Amino acid sequence: MTTRRFIDLSERELLALAISSEEEDGRIYADFADGLRENYPASAHVFTDMAAEENAHRRQLIDLFVQKFGDHIPLVRRQDVRGWVQRRPIWQLRPLGVDVVRRQARQMEQDAARFYQQAASRTTDAAIRKLLGDLAAAEAEHENTAAQIEAEHLPGDVRAGEDDDARRRFILQIIQPGLVGLMDGSVSTLAPVFAAAFATHNPWNAFLVGMAASIGAGISMGFAEALADDGKLSGRGAPLLRGLACGVMTFAGGIGHTLPYLIPNFYTATVIACIVVVIELISIAVIQWKFMSTPPLAAAAKVMLGGALVLAAGILIGNS
């Protein structure tokens, strides 16, 4: 579909574009409210009020359009205008995280105001400049109004509570399954990789074993996490998301110390692989400390002990 330049639109088309944009933004805010209502009711109230603000501005624009151009409003949409600010579809933001939605809402108002201002600076037509300037001011006022509505419905204690809930959900849905996968991939694949390496002294054989073990463990852990809990009672979120996080991190944990065996020299590859193992185990300990409130020394001691035992088992089996 051929798009038109923003500067080529008539005043009638500009008003029609503003009306369709306000309507779309109002519906996006209403979708935000619907997606947040179950877990973040206070923030949902904020976006319900913001949707009402957008609808009020849309009615004002419609009244102005009818007064100047008549009853028929042509369909002019964002995607019909070259360079116009595009909005991400709401389904791309699900599951809705409260911080993501707040950032998206602020960005929506800022982008629209900035675009109107830039467009106004490019035209010499006084009427168009006035119209675009008024629209820019309206969008800037939307941002101020949104801040006032948020302050009214999200006092400090309510927002802090919602932020805590968001962090807890992030840990349950992403960090926890990802950490389980990283631990499994980093530790469980040590034995087969190093056993193959020391049994054959052939880096390529060790790489093939490590790649197979990493892929197999990733698939297995991903399915296990996804099928273990549907998330409805535990609040751990969508099983597909958890399974994906777990599977990807399992593969990442195993492939890290496997890739060095692409180096043809056995001893060089093994030394680098051991260094990677230490980095992996330290990363696990840091994640446990930062997100799981595990004391750093205790976390490091546990993962280092477990990794060392599995690594030793692999080397002993490979040399037997």
Image (cartoon, grey):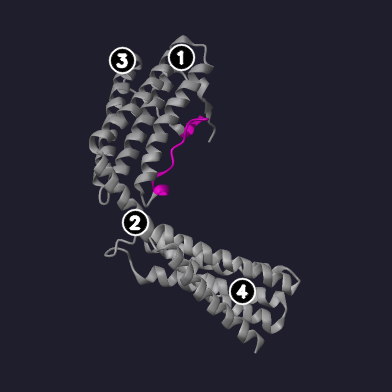
Q: Earlier in the sequence, mark 1 or mark 4?
A: 1
Q: CA distance from mark 2 to mark 4?
A: 33 Å
Taking the view exactly as shown, the residue that stands out farthest to the right is: 265
Q: Which residue, given by chain and number where applicable, does mark 2 sit on?
A: 169
Q: What amino acid does circle 1 point to? A: Arg
Q: Which residue, given by chain and number where applicable, does mark 3 sit on?
A: 67
| 187 and 115: which is toward the camera | 187
Cβ atoms under marks 3 and 1 closer than 8 Å: no
Bounds of the magenta span?
79-93
Q: Earlier in the sequence, mark 2 or mark 3?
A: 3
User: Can residue 312 be spotted in the picture?
Assistant: yes
Please tell me whether residue 262 is drawn above or below residue 117 in the rendered image.
below
Q: CA distance from mark 3 to mark 1?
A: 19 Å
Q: Earlier in the sequence, mark 1 or mark 2?
A: 1
Alpha-carbon neighbours of circle 3 within 10 Å: few (<14), some, or many (≥20)?
Answer: few
Q: Which residue, given by chain and number where applicable, does mark 1 sit on?
A: 129
Q: CA distance from mark 1 to mark 2?
A: 47 Å
Q: Is residue 169 left or right of residue 254?
A: left
Q: CA distance from mark 3 to mark 4?
A: 72 Å
Q: Which residue, given by chain and number where applicable, does mark 4 sit on?
A: 210
Q: What percent of the width, then of the height, locates residue 161?
A: 27, 48
Circle 3: element type:
helix
Badge nearest the viewer, 1 or 2: 2
